[in-house]
Every structure is written in C-alpha cells, then in structure tokens.
Amino acid sequence: MIIDSRTIAGGLDESAVQPRWLNDKLIFASDRTNWWNLYLWSEKRRTSRCARPMRSSARHSGPLGQRAYAIIDDDHLLCTLNRCGKQSIEVLTISDGTLRPIADPGTAATSVDVGAGHAAALLNYPDRPAALALYDLDQHSWTTVRSSTEMIMDAASVSSRPTGQLDHRARDRLRLVLPARQW
C-alpha cells in the first residue's frame, strides 16, 4: 500500500533517469540544468543536491540495460563522464566530491557495473578496438576479458580528435575554437 506519494525528480521540464538506492539515499541522473548530472535525494533533507556538477556526468539511458554509473560502496560511485567531448571513467567520492580517473585519457565506457571487488565496463579506446574489461578495485588495474577484434592497429595511423573549447556565448551559433595547428 502506497501511503506517501510525491515527485522527487522529473516532469515536463526535467528528465530523470537511472535511479538507484544507496541505503536511504536515491541517486539519479537529471538534466534539470540542461546538463546531465548525478543527484542525491534523501528523506532527511527532502531535497536533492547535485553529487557534483560535472556537465554531462551521466547521459540518457540509451539502450536498455546500459548504465552511466555504478555504486561501489556507501561513499563511492564509478562514473562515465563527457566533459565537452572528452570522455573519461572516474571514481566519485560522494562525501567530498572528488573525482579520480581510472582509465587512460580518451577511454570511454558505454556501460559500467560493480560487484565482488571488480568493475565491469564496455570500453571504447581512442587507439584500439572496443573491449569488455574488468577493473580490480583493490589493485587499481584493468584486465581485458574480450576484445571486439584481434586486429592490431599501428598507433601512427590513428588520428586523434582536435582539442579546443566550445564558445557558448553566441546563442545563434556554436563556435569551436581550436589551438593553432596545421592539419
């Protein structure tokens, strides 16, 4: 029997996805600031707060079953991040908001999960084929379980995405400012 019903997040102006309980706190991703961020809601506070403002810390759910974050323990989340197009996989300490990268720069995860001292992730690398990998949470090391292909690519043949900043000041156009470099 439902005794107390109320909206915590979501509505006409907000999407709230990937809800998960962490003890008495509800964690969810929301686009309420026009960026996907993780939020915590607790019965004691009856409000939600941003676990850390990250600009696209999470993303929409995508295909069923894909997860942008996973709970490691009471104070840590494994998160996939996208900061202005730069992908990363990091551990968020909830209590102080710090982030610790756990993969090489540019490595992205399409889905993450945690269990039995390991994190599992579908990794997309900037310089090699995608793979299913396990991260040992105690040893802080990755092990590839299976690669999408055994093809070996010459690193010199792989181009990288140009770095730069998006200029959001002009509302009628979007401008990418690149460092001076010959392409």
Image (spheres, helix red, strand yellow):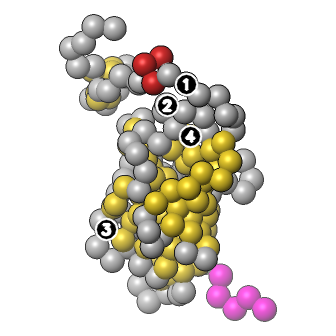
Q: Which mark is residue 127?
A: 2
The disc, 3 or 1, on the residue closer to the chain's N-terminal end is 3
Read off the residue under disc 1.
Answer: 153
Read off the residue under disc 4.
Answer: 124
Residue type of the residue flagged with mark 2: Asp
Q: Quadrant of residue 85?
A: top left
Residue type of the residue flagged with mark 4: Asn
Residue type of the residue flagged with mark 3: Gly
The disc, 4 or 3, on the residue closer to the chain's N-terminal end is 3
Q: Quadrant of residue 95?
A: bottom left
In this view, the mark in front (3 or 2): 2
Distance from disc 2 to disc 4, alpha carbons, whole Å, reads 9 Å
In this view, the mark in front (4 or 3): 4
Q: Residue furthest right?
A: 1
Q: Is residue 183 above or below residue 158?
A: above
The disc, 3 or 2, on the residue closer to the chain's N-terminal end is 3
**Looking at the image, do the residues carrying marks 2 and 1 touch, with CB atoms under 8 Å apart?**
yes
In this view, the mark in front (3 or 1): 1
Read off the residue under disc 3.
Answer: 97
Residue 95 colored in magenta in the image: no
Magenta part of the protein: which range?
Answer: 1-5
